[in-house]
Image: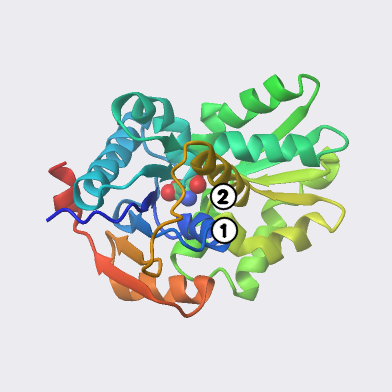
Amino acid sequence: MKKSMNAIGMMDSGIGGLTVLKAVKALLSKESIVFVGDNARNPYGPRRPEEVVQFARQIAHFLIEKYDIKVFVIACNTATACALPVLQKELNIPVIGVIDSGAKAAVKTSQTGRIGLIATEGTVKSAKYQDEIHSLKPGAKVFAQAEPDFVQLVEKNTYQTTAAEEEVAEHLQDFGADKIDTLILGCTHFPLLTKSIQKAVGSGVKLVDAGAATAVDLAKSLKSMDLLDTESAAAASYELYTTGPVDAFEVIATDWLGQGDWHFAHLPVEELEQK
Ligand code: DGL
């Protein structure tokens, strides 16, 4: 049965999208959110773009059919890079990605125009960040590095260990020579590693969280489209689906989001494949 919640629908390839959810909830506390983390098919980063489009499309259809969502937020850089224009054409609700907001925030933050980007291999290869930054600031220099291993540190819940901190430091050491003043966390998993990343690149480099920048733009867009929930008397609700094991998802989610009225549920991949 279709639940009419007037909710914001969101997706990611796994845990990462919860960084966007947290930022959206902080700004828009009255809005109900339904989230799908596709942990069973994570990572999206090394997949063919057509496959990522298909996964994002299946999740959008699930959320539209079951929840009548009013907007679909692709809280995943890789899926934004692959699927945003396609889904904006196909779906009859607004579809919002994370890359434009992240690129815009980075250009605004950087004083020197030397901008680092860490993201999945799919996002780096798509060149969406590089193109958007150059269109906003033609003289900018973008130093892009794929960091697929960081996604696994988060998915496997080892991101708070000393070994993770050392791995991050080792991977990011080359940015020192690039003399960047701004680093884009171009994967929604990466804000969970903020402490280690900041330590690795030094306090002189400003980190830009593309998901947090998206939350600000989402609030503005919903307002301009007159889609903000100003009526709802009921408290906002949060339904969090994962295609992977619920227990593991719940542990990382509550650690990151804090205790709250979260409703966790399993969504079988087979159900998505029928969409
Ligand atoms: N969280 C995703 C992103 O923002 C991707 C991680 C992955 O599945 O490779 O790109």
**Three-letter residue code for mark 1:** Ala
Residue that carries the numbered disc 2 in the rendered image = 215
The residue closer to the viewer here, 202 or 252, is 252
Query: In the image, is 124 to the left or to the right of 30?
Result: right
Query: In the image, is 232 to the left or to the right of 169?
Result: left
| Quadrant of the rendering where the C terminus is positioned | top left
Residue at disc 2, CB closer than 8 Å to ligand 1:
no
Q: 204 above or below 257?
A: above
SS of the residue at dot 1? Answer: helix
Residue that carries the numbered disc 1 in the rendered image = 23
Picture coordinates of residue 176, whole percent (x, y): 83, 47
For disc 1, the neighbor class at 10 Å (few under 14, some 14 to 19, many from 20) is: some
**Three-letter residue code for mark 2:** Ala
Residue at disc 1, CB closer than 8 Å to ligand 1:
no
Picture coordinates of residue 131, whole percent (x, y): 63, 23
Q: 168 above or below 58?
A: below
Picture coordinates of residue 137, whole percent (x, y): 76, 24
At a point 34% along the width and 23% down the height, the residue shown is 89
SS of the residue at dot 2? Answer: helix
Looking at the image, the residue that sits furthest to the bottom is 259
Residue 59, image quadrant: top left
At a point 58% along the width and 63% down the height, the residue shown is 192
At a point 56% along the width and 49% down the height, the residue shown is 215
Query: In the image, is 115 to the left or to the right of 96?
Result: right
Tell me, yes or no, whether the two marked residues, 1 and 2, touch with CB atoms within 8 Å: yes
- The structure's colour scheme is rainbow
For disc 2, the neighbor class at 10 Å (few under 14, some 14 to 19, many from 20) is: many
Q: Which of the numbered marks, if any, corresponds to residue 181?
A: none
| Quadrant of the rendering where the N terminus is positioned | bottom left
Residue 35, image quadrant: bottom left
What is the C-alpha distance between the residues marked 1 and 2?
6 Å
